[in-house]
Image (cartoon, grey):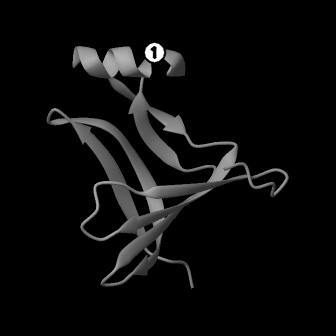
Amino acid sequence: MTPPVVVVRTVFRGQVWNALPNYLIEDSPTRVVTALLPGACCQQPIGPRGEARAVMASGRWQTAETVWHTNRTLWVWPREAAHAVGLFWEHATDRFVG
């Protein structure tokens, strides 16, 4: 059975920075766990990755449809926390990369 899909959005200053479809792995009183897999259609900011902070600080960006690639990502979202922990594996090799 395939897990349900949820959309994880990052919002900054009232504007969506990105929207990423994730499989919902766990939804418990203490945490939410999701997985983002290569091939997922996402909305992400347009422009070079190295300029992301400057673009975000400007408050002016546009998003475009992109395809997630390279890494499988497992996200652990502790309830009531302002952060998540991301674990990344290179999809082609299964190598843990951080």
> Can residue 76 be seen in this snapshot?
yes
x, y (%) of residue 63?
36, 28
Q: Is residue 68 left or right of residue 18?
A: right
Report which quarter residue 84 is drawn in.
Answer: bottom left
Residue found at the very far left of the displayed protein: 14
Residue found at the very far right of the displayed protein: 93
Q: Name the residue: 45% across, 15% down.
A: 51
Quarter of the figure that contains the N terminus:
bottom right
Front position in the image: 80 or 24: 80
Q: Name the residue: 81% across, 58% down.
A: 94
Q: Is residue 39 left or right of residue 28?
A: right
x, y (%) of residue 14?
14, 36
Q: Name the residue: 52% across, 18% down.
A: 50
Would you place residue 26 above or below residue 5 in this image? Answer: below
Front position in the image: 97 or 42: 97
x, y (%) of residue 35?
53, 63
Q: Name the residue: 36% across, 14% down.
A: 54
Type of the residue with mark 1:
Glu
Characterize the local packing of mark 1: few (<14), some (14-19) or many (20 or more) Cα atoms within 10 angstroms.
Answer: few
Q: Across the whole image, how many numbered discs are drawn on residues?
A: 1
Q: Is residue 34 left or right of residue 17?
A: right
Q: Secondary structure at mark 1?
A: helix
x, y (%) of residue 78?
36, 69
Q: Is residue 35 left or right of residue 19?
A: right
Q: Would you name the residue on which mark 1 appears?
A: 51
Would you place residue 27 above or below residue 91 in this image? Answer: below
> Can residue 48 be seen in this snapshot?
no
Would you place residue 87 above or below residue 10 in this image? Answer: below
Front position in the image: 75 or 98: 98
Report which quarter residue 64 is drawn in.
Answer: top left
Front position in the image: 14 or 77: 77
